Image (cartoon, rainbow, N blue to C red):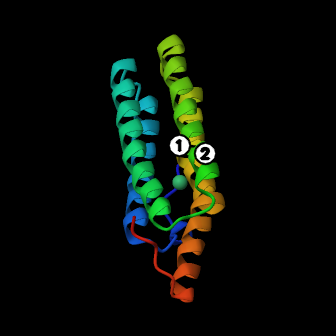
Amino acid sequence: MLKEWSEVYRIGIPEIDEQHQGFFAAAHRLYEAIMDRTGPQTVAEVIAFMRDYAERHFATEEDFMRRHEYQGLREHLVEHSAFFRRLEELEEDLQMFGPSRGLADRALDITQDWLIDHIADEDMLYALHVKAEGREGRRPVAI
Ligand SMILES: [Fe+2]
């Protein structure tokens, strides 16, 4: 089911919250491209856009976590890599079976629904880490 962006997904880091909204928009675009039966070539382009967007967004997050010496970085990186693997599987299914209702639902599951869970389970953790760091008055060490 398509879901609208909601304030409950906000982690309190403006740049990242803004990117999460863009991620949502890219996920919706992908779902709609499949449902509109625009053809495999167009869907493949929208998947490529989704991948580029995710790459840029994850790079922002990973850089942020490194700068704040976040201890859970390694586990978080595993989640990001898993996202690309699932997107690749989706692309393979598209090439083999073409766009379908089932493919659209899976696309939503691995992009929009994945992001919602990822924000709640992983992104909130580093956001809390950064907030705690601010309260303790510690600043990340410049290398
Ligand atoms: Fe993340």
Foreground tag (1 vs 2): 2
Which mark sits nearer the N-terminus, 1 or 2? 2
Residue 33 quadrant: top left
Residues packed near mark 2 inside 10 Å, few (<14), some (14 to 19) or many (20 plus): few
Task: State whether residue 34 is above or below residue 12.
Answer: above
| Residue 122 spot, x, y in % from top left | 62, 58
Estimate the x, y position of residue 5 in percent, counting from the top left: 48, 61
Residue situated in front as seen by the camera: 2 or 139: 139
Would you name the residue on which mark 2 appears? Answer: 79
Q: Which residue is at a point 53% across and 49% down the rendered structure image? A: 2
Seen in the picture, residue 77 relative to 68 is either above or below; the reply is: above
Which amino acid lies under the numbered mark 1 shown in the image of this protein? Answer: Thr
The quarter of the picture where residue 60 lies is bottom left
User: Measuring 44% from the left and 45% from the top, which residue is drawn there?
Assistant: 28
Q: Residue furthest top?
A: 96
Whether residue 113 is visible to the viewer of this picture, yes or no, is no
Spatial CA span between label 1 and label 2? 13 Å
Q: Tell whether circle 2 marks a residue whose Cβ is less than 8 angstroms from ligand 1.
A: yes
Where does residue 53 sit, x and y in percent of width and height? 37, 44
The reply to whether callout 1 and callout 2 are in contact (CB within 8 Å) is no
Which residue is depicted at the point 37% across and 47% down?
56
Mark 1 lies on residue? 111
The one nearer the camera, 125 or 50, is 125
Name the quadrant containing residue 131.
bottom right
Q: Secondary structure at mark 2?
A: helix
Residue type at the position of mark 2: Glu
Task: Return the residue nearer the eye: 83 or 77.
Answer: 77
Q: In what quadrant of the picture does the C terminus appear?
A: bottom left
Would you call the spot at circle 1 few (<14 residues within 10 Å), some (14-19), or many (20 or more)? many
